[in-house]
Image (tube, rainbow, N blue to C red):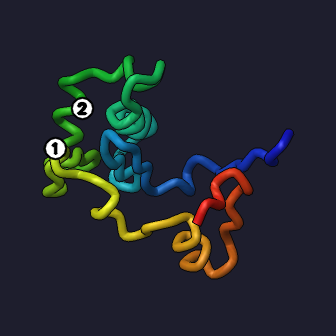
């Protein structure tokens, strides 16, 4: 493999952030709820397409998932200026050496 795979024990994942929203997995009360939260923010993927809109709405009310509008982000105005990191270099610097980006991302 060009890059080694990263494996993380599932119970250690507290948040998943996608362009669709945020799943606060640490707030889930069960494995099924964790799965539903992941599906809610998985977008147009096989997992995301299986989400149940009623369950997603309940998770949203309970604060287990949040979408851009819940976070005060107007998606019509969203662009890179809203990001804290302006470059891959920022991410590398802020990680204190823990993140070393792949060469193809180094355009900073």
User: Where residue 56 sits: x, y (%)?
Assistant: 24, 32
Q: Quadrant of residue 84?
A: bottom left
Q: Nearer the viewer, residue 107 or 60?
A: 107
Total marks shown come to 2
Q: Residue furthest front?
A: 107
User: Where residue 18 sits: x, y (%)?
Assistant: 40, 44
Q: Nearer the viewer, residue 46 or 62?
A: 46
Quadrant location, the C terminus: bottom right
Quadrant location, the N terminus: top right
Callout 1: SS? loop
Name the residue rendered at 33%, 23% in the picture.
Answer: 51
Q: Which residue is mark 1?
A: 76
Q: Are marks 2 and 1 in contact (CB under 8 Å)?
A: no
- Is 15 left, or right, of 62 in this rendering? right
25 over 53 or under it: above or below: below
Q: Which residue is mark 2?
A: 56
Q: Quadrant of residue 39?
A: top left
Q: Nearer the viewer, mark 2 or mark 1?
A: 1
C-alpha span from label 2 to label 1: 22 Å
Label 1 Cα neighbours within 10 Å, binned few <14 / some 14-19 / many ≥20? few
Callout 2: SS? helix
Name the residue rendered at 33%, 49% in the picture.
Answer: 22
- For marks 2 and 1, the one nearer the N-term is 2
- Is 95 left, or right, of 29 in this rendering? right
81 over 13 or under it: above or below: below
Q: Nearer the viewer, residue 90 or 71?
A: 90
User: Where residue 64 sits: x, y (%)?
Assistant: 28, 48
């Amino acid at each position: 493999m060009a890059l080694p795979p990263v494996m993380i024990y599932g119970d250690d994942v507290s948040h998943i952030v996608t362009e669709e929203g945020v799943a606060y997995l640490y707030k889930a009360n069960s494995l099924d709820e964790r799965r539903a939260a992941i599906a809610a923010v998985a977008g147009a993927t096989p997992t995301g397409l299986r989400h149940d809109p009623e369950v997603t709405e309940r998770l949203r009310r309970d604060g287990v998932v949040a979408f851009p509008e819940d976070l005060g982000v107007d998606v019509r105005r969203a662009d890179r200026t809203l990001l804290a990191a302006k470059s891959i270099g920022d991410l590398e610097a802020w990680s204190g050496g823990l993140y070393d980006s792949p060469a193809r991302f180094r355009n900073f």
